[in-house]
Amino acid sequence: MQGLIRPAPQCAHDAAAIDAIGATDALARFVAQTSFADLPEPAVRVLRCCFLDYVGNSAFASLHGESSPAIRAAIARLDAADGPGTVIGEGRGYSWQYAALLNGAYAHTLDFDDTNQGHPGAPVISAALVEAERVDAGGTAFLEALAVGYEVYCRVGGAITIAGYDRGFHITAIAGIFGSVAAVSKLRGLDPPAIGNAFGLALSKASGSMQYLENGSWNKRLHPGFAAHDAFLCVTMAEAGVIGAAAAIEGRYGVLTSFTGAPQPGILTNGLGTQWTLLRTAIKPYPSCRFTHSAIDAAIALRQQISAADLSRAAIHIGLSPVAMKIVGERSPAKLDPRNNVDAQFSVYFQAAAAWLDGKLEWSSYQRLGAPDIVALAQRITTHVDPAMQKIGSSFTVEIDGITLSRTIDTPLGEPECPLDWNGLTAKFLSLAEPTYGSAKAAAIEQAVRTMGPATAMSGLVKGLRRAAATPLS
């Protein structure tokens, strides 16, 4: 039987994809062959941190996210009977794929979840958590699944590059289904051909539009849930023998030609298995778009040099990278005076004003939407594009009565260069988890994640993430 003949590249994008021939198959082999022994200790440490952070975000959002009651009600209509799958912060169970959907939505609701080429944890952990509960995996098997899921996500997202945003795609959603497929496939022990078929099917389910920015919609919060949910469909079909598209990522009509105008195909496989891109994952200290965090850091630092009485008289100028300007810096009514949480999360004007005036930025800051002092200061904030600025960096200049203060931050708090340590992460986790679980149970969850190992039965750990029946849902 003759092999397939690849057509000659028809455009520059095709040529870039052809350079990555075999990348999908290479990723499938990586998923199947990687074991816990292959993981460097720093990768295991990062994954534990991400898992604890994920649980805290999801637990708080399940009860306090303004979108959660409506999303939960919709899923209850589709999945009315109590099921076996755990949703973090809820008392009842759901069918497996709907548990994955709700967990993914809750994890991303606060925009407080980890970041690396988008948000890998919300889709990948949601898929792995449900599958680990379903098969009662051990702790090391769960960490293996997280490792390959994160690594596939980060490499696909990195290969798409920020140019994906220029085409209007949400990288978290596109890379998310591939990372989720990898995690579920690992826990099911699929071989490389089956994983390749699951990736091929995932290509037809990959979706996620940035149009949510138009009206602060809840689409973005659902994207990781959709990815985790659809990963179960793709993996189950591939496991049953359904054939998926070959070369789903690098092919002529694959990810690198469909979702970006400037792909970097080498990122898919360069150093695969030896250089772990998941190590670049950051933990957020603030519940807002990562593109606003350098400005928040600068505002909190510089305000300490100003008397409280003078803070409200400041004029602020912020320099942003080109991609950050498009997402958080455009001077539009929704950003200058946001009236819903999503718009505020994607407004450097609101974030900088709240951080400057209050000296902090936390979920309760969104109770300040429309506050006269926030709105007035936001109107005095100007922004400009700095082509030399790091993607998530910003320059921050304050002027008060002829006094000028400036701070440029290339790398905000939470990045690998200036990470939150376990104590800082635990403080964040407890602040989010205690309102749902109470202090004793929240502390027990932190200990379970910190000590998770080969003897850990994930079904028991996951079921322990349910909410006590006495705690009412909003």
Image (cartoon, helix red, strand yellow):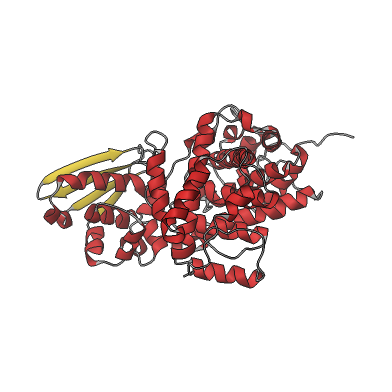
In this rendering, would 405 be left or right of 437?
left
Q: Position of residue 117 (x, y in %)?
A: 50, 43
Q: Residue at x 56, y 54 (%)?
A: 464
- Judge by depth and name the residue closer to the eye, 95 or 348: 95
- Residue 474 in percent (x, y) is at 46, 70
Q: Is residue 162 visible?
A: no
Count of numbered circles in the view: 0
Question: Residue 176, position in %: x, y?
Answer: 58, 48
Name the image quarter holding the N terminus: top right
Residue 6 quadrant: top right
Please name whichever residue, 276 or 437, is drawn nearer the observer in this view of the structure. 437
| Left or right for 302, reference 161 | left
Q: Nearer the viewer, residue 262 or 142?
A: 142
**Residue 101 found in image quarter:** bottom right
Position of residue 60 in the picture relative to residue 169 (left or right): left
Residue 70, image x, y percentages: 52, 70
The answer to whether residue 343 is seen in the rendering is yes
Q: Residue furthest right?
A: 1
Up the image or down, 127 lies above or below 20; here it is: below
The one nearer the camera, 407 or 33, is: 33
Classify 93 as above or below 430.
below
**Residue 414 figure quarter:** top left
The structure residue drawn at horizontal position 51% and vertical position 55%, both measured from the top left corner, is 107
Residue 421 versus residue 232 in the image, above or below: above
| Furthest residue toward left | 401
Task: Identify the residue shown where x is 63% and y is 29%.
Answer: 37
Left or right, 387 with reference to 121: left
Q: Residue at x 62, y 47 (%)?
A: 458
Most extreme residue toward the front is 440
